[in-house]
Amino acid sequence: MLDGVTTFCQQQFVRGSGLSMRIALYQPDIAGNVGAILRLGACLGVPVDVIEPTGFTWSDKALARSGMDYADTVDVTRHADWEAFLATVTGRLVLLTTRGGTRLDAATFAADDTLLLGSEGSGVPDSIHALADVAVRIPLAAGMRSLNIAVAAGIGVAEALRQTGGWPHDP
């Protein structure tokens, strides 16, 4: 259900293009991770899409601990399902995944990319994996399986913003 926290739908623009890089979370399981990613989006000026259902009840309380007071400043849109989300995507869909064929340090990002991350427990289904324009993996040390989703989002967004000149301007 899409009740609870107010969604903020202000459009943000990248260098006059009318397009904005976005972070999208596919059916996330853990409220604390979502809160951390909402804080990331608020601090870096990157809108966040949450594709329902989530593995937790969406509420201010569930997100407050890691999102702190940033939840009210992030541009977050909740989508009832994958199809509703997909209808809003205007640029490339870049999947950050442990199964990615392109290393992060070899990937090329565009200012209007949507960086998609799967749920903590199961990632994204193969059908969604196949729809990604590019599947990117963050290289890990030998024997390591995966990063926390919020850490992976931060690393991926940082590289994408670096490449596209999309970092926020200093105050």
Image (spheres, helix red, strand yellow):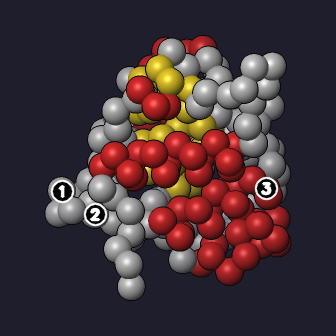
Whether residue 167 can be seen here: yes
Label of residue 86 in the image? none
Label of residue 13 in the image? 2
* Cα distance in 3D space between marks 2 and 3: 28 Å
Q: Which residue is mark 1?
A: 17
> Do the residues under discs 2 and 1 have CB atoms within 8 angstroms?
yes
Whether residue 76 can be seen here: no
Q: Nearer the viewer, residue 48 or 81?
A: 48
SS of the residue under disc 3: helix
Residue 32: image x %, image y %? Answer: 79, 58
Q: Residues within 10 Å of mark 3 (few under 14, many from 20)?
A: many
- Does residue 133 lie above or below 41 as drawn? above
- Mark found first going from the N terminus, 2 or 3: 2
SS of the residue under disc 2: loop
- Does residue 59 lie above or below 131 as drawn? below
Q: Nearer the viewer, residue 99 or 31?
A: 99
Q: Which residue is mark 3?
A: 31
* Amino acid type at mark 2: Phe
Residue depicted at 45% across the width and 60% down the height: 46
* Amino acid type at mark 1: Ser
Residue 34: image x %, image y %? Answer: 70, 55
* Amino acid type at mark 3: Ala
> Is 14 placed left or right of 106 in the picture?
left
